[in-house]
Image (cartoon, helix red, strand yellow):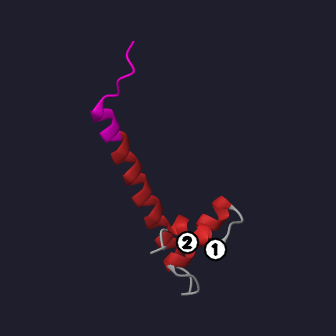
Amino acid sequence: MTDEVDPQDVDEVTTAVLTASRLLLAIAVRSLSSVPDVVTVPQFRMLVVMATRGESKLTALADDLGVNG
């Protein structure tokens, strides 16, 4: 038995994850489009990060969102 990973399997899994991610983003955007412009997509993304990671400092949230420059 070997521990080698078939590169084709990695590519297929990567493609599947990217496809799922795009579909979930499309669902989120579609959901947001049905409500008034109360929450923007970036605000929604921030709320999702906050909901999944819990309390954190503002600098940690900025890091999670990739907005530190």
Give the extent of the magenta segment.
1-12
Question: Which residue is label 2 attached to?
Answer: 62
Q: Which residue is situated farthest in the left direction here? A: 8
Label 2 Cα neighbours within 10 Å, binned few <14 / some 14-19 / many ≥20:
few
Relative to residue 67, is residue 54 drawn left or right? Answer: right
The amino acid at mark 1 is Leu
Q: Which residue is situated farthest in the right direction here? A: 55
Q: Are marks 1 and 2 in contact (CB under 8 Å)?
A: yes
Q: Element type at marker 2? A: helix
45 and 34: which is toward the camera: 45
Residue at left offset 45%, top offset 64%:
25
- Is 43 covered by the magenta stretch? no
- Against 66, residue 33 (above or below) is below
Give the spatial CA distance, label 1 vs label 2: 6 Å
The amino acid at mark 2 is Ala
Q: Which residue is situated farthest in the front direction here? A: 69
Please state, as top left, top right, bottom left or bottom right, where the N terminus lies in the image: top left
57 and 38: which is toward the camera: 57
Q: Could you tell me residue 53's position as x and y percent?
A: 65, 60
Residue at left offset 30%, top offset 41%:
11
Please state, as top left, top right, bottom left or bottom right, where the C terminus lies in the image: bottom left
Quadrant in which residue 57 is drawn: bottom right
12 and 59: which is toward the camera: 59
Label 1 Cα neighbours within 10 Å, binned few <14 / some 14-19 / many ≥20:
few
Residue at left offset 72%, top offset 65%:
55
Relative to residue 10, is residue 50 drawn left or right? Answer: right
- Against 17, residue 66 (above or below) is below
- Is 11 covered by the magenta stretch? yes
Q: Could you tell me residue 60's position as x and y percent?
A: 60, 67
Relative to residue 23, is residue 35 drawn left or right? Answer: right
Question: Which residue is label 1 attached to?
Answer: 58
